[in-house]
Image (tube, rainbow, N blue to C red):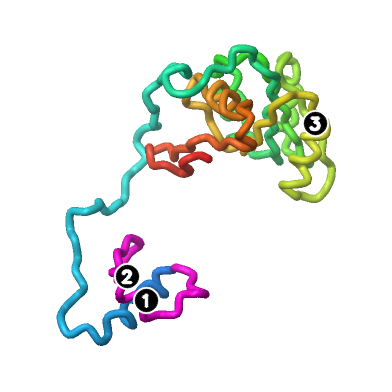
């Protein structure tokens, strides 16, 4: 068993045809065996303390990263261009409502709207939530009554928007950094940047996505 972190000496890999190599645990083990089969010594080493192994960690808390002012790290977005946060959803109120509430309650950016892209929600509690949340001046619900297609739903939302910046957000995301919109916008408005991705965390603090 080689695990997901393996270091090879290039002299071994040069023996192999890796033009069509797609890494997996099985293929890594195979090429390791092929690469060292003629090695007279014992070249395989297990380094115990290089990395840590992730064991089972019960979810007993929700991760909160330390807050930093946006100007500590990123250029500021002084003029606050308009932002439309597009959130496709179908029911799943148990994840959608915390997502919407966290945006409205925690975001320090002011010039934004939330567009909930409703893909044929059926549950009564979801529909009641839509009726209530639409009373908020920064929230609207747009109906997409067609078969699920994530790209089509977002393209539909983009066509309905007049904002300068679009944020495509999954309905299971919760805001944990107050200046998250400032961070994204201040990068997106740079002339040499076309797309920006946020760092996403799992609730236990592990990184789900390191950003773009």
Q: Secondary structure at mark 2?
A: helix
Q: Quadrant of residue 58?
A: top left
Crowding at dot 3, Cα within 10 Å, few <14 / some 14-19 / many 20+, comes out as some
Residue 36 relative to residue 160: left or right: left
| Disc marking residue 142 | 3
Mark 1 residue crowding within 10 angstroms, few (<14) / some (14–19) / many (20+): few
Residue 10 disc label: 2
Which residue is located at x 53 percent, y 25 percent? 183
Magenta residues? Answer: 1-23
Instruction: State the separation of the CA atoms marked 1 and 3.
Output: 56 Å
Which residue is under mark 1?
Answer: 14
Q: CA distance from mark 1 to mark 2?
A: 6 Å
In what element is the residue under mark 1? loop
| Separation of marks 2 and 3 at Cα, in angstroms | 55 Å
Residue at figure coordinates x 44%, y 68% from the top left: 24
> In this rendering, is residue 46 above or below 81?
below
Left or right? Give the position of 113 relative to 39.
right
N-term-proximal mark, 1 vs 3: 1
Q: Are marks 1 and 3 in contact (CB under 8 Å)?
A: no
The image shows residue 107 at horizontal and vertical percentages of: 56, 18
Q: Quadrant of the N terminus?
A: bottom left
**Mark 1 vs 2: CB contact within 8 A:** yes
Horizontal side, residue 167 vs residue 36: left or right:
right
């Amino acid at each position: 068993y080689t695990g997901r972190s393996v270091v090879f000496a290039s002299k071994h890999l040069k023996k192999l045809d890796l033009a069509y190599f797609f890494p997996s645990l099985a293929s890594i083990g195979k090429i390791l065996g092929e690469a060292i089969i003629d090695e007279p010594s014992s070249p395989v080493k297990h380094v115990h303390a290089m990395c840590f192994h992730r064991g089972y960690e019960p979810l007993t808390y929700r991760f909160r990263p330390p807050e930093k002012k946006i100007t500590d790290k990123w250029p500021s977005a002084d003029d606050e261009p308009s932002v439309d946060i597009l959130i496709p959803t179908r029911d799943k109120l148990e994840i959608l409502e915390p997502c919407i509430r966290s945006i409205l309650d925690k975001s320090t950016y002011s010039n934004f709207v939330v567009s909930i892209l409703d893909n044929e929600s059926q549950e009564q509690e979801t529909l009641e939530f839509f009726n209530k949340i639409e009373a908020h001046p920064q929230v609207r619900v747009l109906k997409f009554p067609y078969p699920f297609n994530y790209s089509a739903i977002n393209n539909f939302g983009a066509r309905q928007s007049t904002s300068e910046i679009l944020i495509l957000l999954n309905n299971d995301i919760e805001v944990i950094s107050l200046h998250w919109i400032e961070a994204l916008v201040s990068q997106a408005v740079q002339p040499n940047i076309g797309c920006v991705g946020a760092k996403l965390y799992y609730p236990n603090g592990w990184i789900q996505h390191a950003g773009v």
